[in-house]
Structure formats: structure tokens, C-alpha cells
Image (cartoon, rainbow, N blue to C red):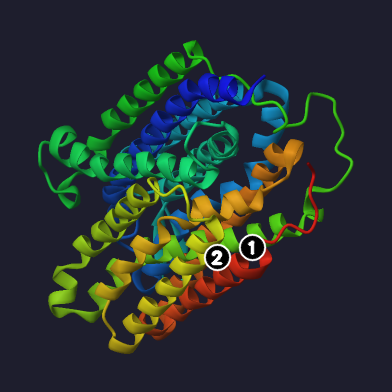
Amino acid sequence: MSNSKSEENYLGPFLTLVFLFFIVGFLTTANGQFQGPLKAAFLSGAGDLKNTFATLISFSWFLAYPLTGGIGSAWVTKFGYKGTLIRALLVMIVGLGVFFMSSWYYEQFPGSNVQIASATIPVGYFIFLLGSFVVGSAATIMQVVLNPYLTACNVKGTQPVQRLNIGGSSNSIGTTVAPFFVTGIVFGGLAMEKVEVKQLMIPFIGLMVVIAVITFILSKLSLPDIKGTKTEKGEKLEKSVWSFSHLTLGVIAIFFYVGVEVAIGANINLFAISLGGSFASQAAIMATLYWGGMLVGRLISSSISKISPQVQLAFTSILAAIFTIAAIALNNPWLLVVVGLFHSVMWGAIFTLSVNKLGKYTSVASGVFMIGVLGGAVIPLLQGGLADAFGWRWTWFLVIAGELFILYYALLGSKVKQSAE
């Protein structure tokens, strides 16, 4: 197949996956909006451990990445990219059903609690954590498909990191519009803190129906496998995927990247509230603008076709570290908001560098890569525990440490010492 023919054939699948990125972002954030009232109800009796229990929600979600990334790779080998996406969406429907059960159980058995130290936690909360893990598993398996496919599907005038950033932009647009859809349309403008748990059951069912429809549509669309990016059924790989140092270090880099990205996005509002005054009253808008900066940065990077992923990653990690240092020195959370702009390009750059010249190891590497996403569980949870002990200000040194490793990866760790092509 000629290069021009390949480009012509993959434009349709590329646009399909970009749209799917939007749907994933939209549904993930919409689902997150529904979690707000559940958090308020479940953690009202958590006492001094409230920060720790709140971060367990993210922990259960991101724990799915290292545990199910390998399942995604195995499914790609057995069912192909399209078959794996369809199965991942079915898993997501199951996870949303578990979320429905958590709210239903809470309403039916309001006195069913578990005592942990000084905290009184409803049993429904633990069902809720299970739902987070299942939906996180679905997101993991989808990422195992979406990332390598966008990297490999050659489209004229683009480079791999640019295609990933286009997909990321679509995802960010979905995450941006979802909160307005949920609060403005689903709940008619009612503030989320005033929404009762029992009001969430129908929206959860609605999300399940929407994803079922998307699954059906996807089953009718063309999404051909890309030769040379995955092992065929029954084929054995000659080497361990861990023998490629640029992938191994990339997994560590993504651990720190996702960890610091989620730490700021999830905890900046808690930091602002702890400072009181005008910061506390502006806490909600800070998180919104942080994620908005991610969108702006991805839209900008989507148009960049000449700057290498190494340069993009080095430049943004340096600036992210500088603004985080300034936030600590001035005790000002607004400076952390700016970091979202620099975090926007990191996922695409790290993934592109990690799977560079891996050939048929690419799909397996994509599953291994998901192990690093555990950072989104570990670092925010660690930060929440440290904040309970010492306050939020000094915990942001965790972010600086992460940015420095990402800088090392951009400059040295991403160099290909062994190629599979």
C-alpha cells in the first residue's frame, strides 16, 4: 500500500477516534459531576480523614490503569482495535450500573455504615469506589486503543504527537461542555451541592443508554487494524517490552505527569479553601480554569507540526516547575492554574516518545504504558495525606519533583537505544 493510499484510508478512522475522544471526555466529566452529591453524602461523617477519603475516589479510578492495561493489550491482539473499543464501552455501561447501585443502596439503607478510626462511612461509598474502578477499567482499555491508533494512522500534514493532541483537544472540549450540560440541562440550573442522591439514579441510567447507543453506532463504522502495530493472534514476541529503555522511562514519566496533573486539578480547590478569604470564594473557578488551560494548550499544540515532542516536553516541564515554585513561594493557588496550559501537551509528547520505533510491540507497549497512569492515584492520595498532617502549601513540592523527572525524560530518557523496526 502506498503512503498516499494509507493516508487516504486512515482519515475516516482518525476522525472517528477524534469524535470518540470527545465522547469519552464528555461522559467522564458528566459522570464526575454526578459524583459531587455522592461525595457530600458519603463523606459527611469522615471528620479529620475527609481529605484522605476524598482522594480515595481518584485512587480507585486510577488503580484500574495498571491492573487492566494488560487486558486491553490482550484484547487488541484477540479482537482487534474495533472489537476492543466495543468491549470497553460495554464495561463502562457495567460501571455506571454500579454507580447507580451505590446511590440506590444509600437511599434504601441509610443507616448502613462502617466505622474506620474516627470516620463513619456509608456502605454505599464502597460500592461507589467499585464503580470508579470499573469505569476506570473501561477508560484504560479505550486508551490502549486510542493512543497507539492515533499515533500510527498516517494522515497527511500531521505528525504523531500532533494527532494525539488533536484527540486530546476533542477530549478537553467534551470535558469543558459536560458540566454545563449536567447542571444546566439535566438538573435545570440547580447547584450540584443541592442535588440529592436520589436524583442521580435516572441520569445514571440515561448515561448507560447513551453509551449503549454509541457502542451500536461504533459497531457499524469502519475501523481497520493498522499492520505492524500489534502482534497477531498466537504470535510470540522475541523480546520483553521492558527491554526498550525509552518505554520503561516513559512509563515512569507518565506516572509523574498524570500524578501532578490530577493533583493540581483535584486539590487546587482544597488548597484555596484552606487559605480562606478571597481564595476560598474563588476555589471552584480555579479548577475550571486549570482544565480550561489544558484545552487551550491542546488546541494550540494541535496546529504545531514542526516542533518535535522532545522540545515541546522540555519547554513545558520547565515552565510548569517555575510556576509551581512561584505558587509555593507566594502561597498563591492562582499560579497553579497557569500550569494547566503547560500540562496540555505532555501526554501526547510522552506517549509518542515512548512508543517510537516499537513496531509490532506498540499495542503491548500501550498496555504497559497504562501502568504509569497509577500516578494519578498515588500522588494525589499522598498529597491528601500530607495535607491532613502539614497543610497544603508545602505538598506542592511533589509537583516540582514530577516536573523535573519529566524534563529529564525529554532531554535524555526518551532517546531510543534499541529499535524494534
Task: Give above or below for 54 relative to 300.
Answer: below
Between the residue at mark 2 and the residue at mark 1, the CA separation in whole angstroms equals: 7 Å
Residue 287 placement, left or right of 56: left
Residue 123 is situated, as x and y percent measured from the top left of the image, at: 44, 49
Amino acid tagged 1: Ile
Q: Are marks 2 and 1 in contact (CB under 8 Å)?
A: yes
Q: Nearer the viewer, residue 314 or 395?
A: 314
Q: Nearer the viewer, residue 356 or 220?
A: 356
Residue 171 is situated, as x and y percent measured from the top left of the image, at: 38, 41
Residue 377 is situated, as x and y percent measured from the top left of the image, at: 52, 59
At 20% from the left edge and 37% from the top edge, which residue is drawn?
Answer: 181
Residue 294 placement, left or right of 379: left
Furthest residue in direction left, as rendered: 189
Q: Nearer the viewer, residue 192 or 123?
A: 192
Task: Give above or below for 263 relative to 64.
Answer: below
| Any part of residue 382 in sight | yes
Where does label 2 land, which residue?
A: 256
Where does label 1 land, which residue?
A: 252
At 57% from the left edge and 39% from the top edge, which residue is drawn?
Answer: 151
* Secondary structure beneath label 1: helix
For the N terminus, which image quadrant? top right
Task: Give above or below for 339 relative to 175.
Answer: below
Furthest residue in direction bottom, as rendered: 329
At 53% from the left edge and 56% from the top edge, which residue is drawn?
Answer: 309
Furthest residue in direction right, as rendered: 238
For the C terminus, which image quadrant? top right
Quadrant in which residue 206 is drawn: top left
Quadrant in which residue 166 is drawn: top left
At 10% from the left edge and 36% from the top edge, which residue is drawn?
Answer: 188
